[in-house]
Image (cartoon, helix red, strand yellow):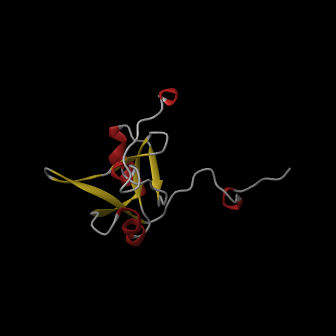
Amino acid sequence: MTHTLYGDDPEPCEQVPAGRLCVPVRPVAHGCAARLFRTPPGVRTAVAFTTPARLRAVLGADQPWTALAEPALRALVRPLGVETLTVDPTLTAPGPRHLGPPSGQPLRPLPVAAR
């Protein structure tokens, strides 16, 4: 019988980031709060980055952030019903202002069959 140790598993069930995480924040009346995002299916998630450079690459240089450990971030958002933590997200969609037709082209109504 072969026993596989957790450390020998090429893809452990739960990968926990080690060390400091860069957590995007937003200003509130008495300081700041962690920004919450939504996954593509719509689940609320806390987001963190392993380096300030990765945070800036995704959210821009003007995004304020704070350093937190993974357990502290989870404890901070758990009372809000957030159980998911996304680390180093790279795929983002443009905001609604970018979803219109190419500049200079008028909007056309959908055909009746497509409505």
- Farthest bottom residue in view: 53
Residue drawn at (46%, 53%) of the image: 86
Figure quadrant of residue 69: bottom left
**Number of numbered markers:** 0
In the shown orientation, is residue 64 left or right of residue 6? left
Is 114 left, or right, of 55 in this rendering? Answer: right
Give the camera-side residue of 31 and 2. Answer: 31
Residue in front for this viewpoint, 18 or 37: 37
Judge whether 61 appears above or below 115 on screen. Answer: below
Q: Position of residue 103 (x, y in %)?
A: 36, 57
Residue 84 x/y as whole percent: 46, 45
Q: Residue 37: percent from the left, percent from the top? A: 38, 48
Q: Residue furthest right?
A: 1
> Compared with residue 113, is residue 105 higher up or lower down, i.e. above or below?
below
Q: Position of residue 32 (x, y in %)?
A: 21, 55
Residue situated in front as seen by the camera: 76 or 112: 112
- What residue do we see at 51% from left, 30% from top? 114
Q: Is residue 113 above or below residue 25?
A: above
